[in-house]
Amino acid sequence: MTIPTHEDQENAKETLAYIRRTMESASTFTAVSGWGLVTVGGIGLLAAWLAWSGGQNTDLRVWIPAALVSVAVATVLNWTKARHLDVPLWSGVFRKIAWVMIPAMAAGALLTVALAEQGVSDLLPGTWLALYGAGVTAGGTFSVRAIRWMGVAFLILGAGALLRPDVGLVLLAVGFGGLHVAVGLDIVVRHGG
């Protein structure tokens, strides 16, 4: 039996690091916080109620802060779950999710500005739901199955809101409120919080 040289040990470390990076980039992102989704759903329901009670279904003074708070809450609770699971939040898989979701979210932000400036705010609920659904569906391919199906459901709600703008607020509440809560509870039960 021979004793490995320093060079052999370094090669073994490099090989293990390569294997770890490869496995990480091929795995599923499971650090999605179910409680984070439930909280985001609560924020969505509150925003829908505030918009409804204010008489403006697409009041950007309600929806933009709700979206920003939701992103912050989801980030903190996903980070907390990742830390609890002892997995890096900014893993190769999470970076892929970000790369496929950010363009859809950016398109939603740009269309929000354009539609609001043109006075076509009745198309905002469908636009938000459809583009969020597109981003979540794409990102869900790297995550647990429930996330992908949530994205598909958002796309369907978005189509409904674009075809029937008169029910846009209800569909916003169902999507950003109800779907987040339902999928979040599913993740809590099946994937440990």
Image (cartoon, rainbow, N blue to C red):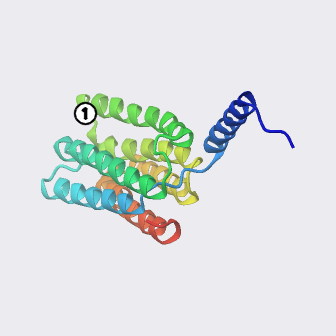
User: Left or right: where does residue 12 sit relative to residue 191?
Assistant: right
Name the one closer to the observer, 147 or 30. Answer: 30
What residue sits 46% from the left and 55% below the top?
Answer: 32
Q: Where is residue 133 in the image (x, y as percent from the top left)?
A: 47, 47
User: Left or right: where does residue 173 sit relative to residue 134?
Assistant: left
Q: Specify the quadrant of the image occupied by residue 184.
A: bottom left
On-image quarter of the C terminus: bottom left
Mark 1 crowdedness (10 Å alpha carbons): few <14, some 14-19, many ≥20: some
Farthest right residue? 1
On-image quarter of the N terminus: top right
Name the one closer to the observer, 85 or 175. Answer: 85
Q: Specify the quadrant of the image occupied by residue 130.
A: top left
- 112 relative to 155, above or below: above
Q: Specify the quadrant of the image occupied by residue 183.
A: bottom left
Q: Where is residue 15 in the image (x, y as percent from the top left)?
A: 71, 35
Farthest left residue? 54
Farthest bottom residue? 189
What residue sits 19% from the left and 53% below the top?
Answer: 51
Q: Where is residue 39 in the image (x, y as percent from the top left)?
A: 31, 60
Q: Position of residue 6 (x, y in %)?
A: 70, 30
Q: Which amino acid does label 1 sit on?
A: Ala
Please give the count of numbered marks on the rendered protein: 1
- 47 relative to 113, above or below: below
What residue sits 46% from the left and 45% below the top?
Answer: 89
What residue sits 29% from the left and 56% below the top?
Answer: 44
Local secondary structure at mark 1: helix
- 62 relative to 100, above or below: below
Which residue has dot 1 on it?
A: 116
